[in-house]
Amino acid sequence: MRYDYFHYTELDRKFYEEHLKDRIPHEFIDCHTHINLMEHLVDVPKERIADDWALQSGMHMSADDAKFYYDTFFPDQKWNIVAFPFPIREAHLEENNEYVAKCADEGKIAYGLMSIKPDYSLEYIERELTTKRFSGVKPYPDMVSGKKGAEISIFQFMPHDQLKLMEKLHMPIVMHLPRAGRMPDDNNIKELKEIRQKYPELKMVIAHLGRCFTPYFFKQAVEKMGEDIHGFYFDTAAVLNPEVHRMALEKLSHKKILFGTDIPIFLWHGRRKWTETSYINLAREDFMWNKHHESKEIEAGYTFYVYEQINNLLNEMERANLSRKETEDIFCNNAKEVFNRKI
Ligand SMILES: [Zn+2]
């Protein structure tokens, strides 16, 4: 099912040609996307969706839909995606995982990750990962608590024996951190350092730059992590804030940053504004969550959120004097290094 609200306009085309077409590397990989079929999400309760702006924005996307959206967004690029199910407790995860692996097998997506639950046995996970075309796993706090930013431990939704198995199999993990305090929460810091120490060979990509959507959080995360921060990869999914991009490029090695979007959540036109500790989504489309903070005239000038995100990131890369090769690492090569199967 494609979203009716998805519209490519003349203004988008101009923005793309002016700001993105020749600046995004010719080949790129979006490291953070969700794919599924309608039937995988039929049992997600309406209240869950009513409570979550992201799911309201976009939760359905098959690999074929993805092709349509990405071909529309990026007509001149050779794009590819790393895709996984929406890891929602009520989703039909096993079927959705199966679908992801099949799409990877058929070459519809470059890399597919398996969503895992804490109660999956090690035997089951190992068998799935080694016999099907998965390139890593995606645990998620939702498997333990449906509340966003729930005060739970990483080890509750990804137990130690699963972490150990991933280290043994050389399979990367895309980790969405828990807790309202985001990455710099003292318990998150403690647990991440513990992971570094206990599983030194483990490849972990911390999603959404640690859910640090404003510099306030990212700055603290960097300070508290110290040298250990260099033991992790980070994806840029959903992060629009240029100051966060700037800080990430300053503080992290360009070899540890992976470009990502979180499509299909972001198929709409809009941008963000920020307070010190939170963000407000500004969108043209009429979502349940949209309070239309700006006038119709201003909204008419919005381009895609994803275009704004990429443009901000490219601006900061230029400001940081990244070479073409370093830019390509972030948009493409790092993803290949992380997700290429070793087994
Ligand atoms: Zn996501």
Image (cartoon, helix red, strand yellow):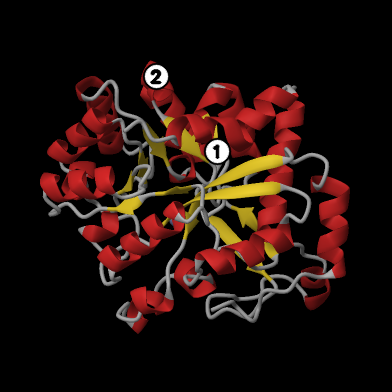
State the residue in front, 21 or 145.
21
Q: Position of residue 133 (x, y in %)?
A: 36, 48
State the residue in front, 42 or 12.
42
Q: CA distance from mark 1 to mark 2?
A: 17 Å
Q: Is residue 235 above or below residue 141?
A: above
Which comes before the other along the chain, label 1 or label 2? Answer: 1
Q: Position of residue 184 (x, y in %)?
A: 37, 36
Q: Position of residue 294 (x, y in %)?
A: 73, 70
Q: Is residue 302 left or right of residue 86?
A: right
Neighbour class for label 2 at 10 Å: few (<14), some, many (≥20)?
few
Q: Amino acid at mark 2?
A: Gly
Q: Amino acid at mark 1?
A: Pro
Q: Is residue 240 visible?
A: no
Residue at 11 percent of width and 50 percent of height = 121
- Identify the image quadrant of the C terminus: top left
Q: Is residue 199 left or right of residue 183?
A: left
Q: Is mark 2 within 8 Å of ligand 1?
A: no
State the residue in front, 342 or 40.
342
Q: Is residue 14 left or right of residue 328?
A: right
Q: Position of residue 97 (x, y in %)?
A: 32, 60
Which secondary structure lies at badge 1? Answer: helix
Which secondary structure lies at badge 2? Answer: helix
Neighbour class for label 1 at 10 Å: few (<14), some, many (≥20)?
many
Q: Is residue 280 above or below residue 259?
A: below
Residue at 19 percent of width and 47 percent of height = 127
Dots 1 and 2: beta carbons under 8 Å? no
Q: Quadrant of ligand 1?
A: bottom left
Residue occupied by mark 1:
215
Residue occupied by mark 2:
226
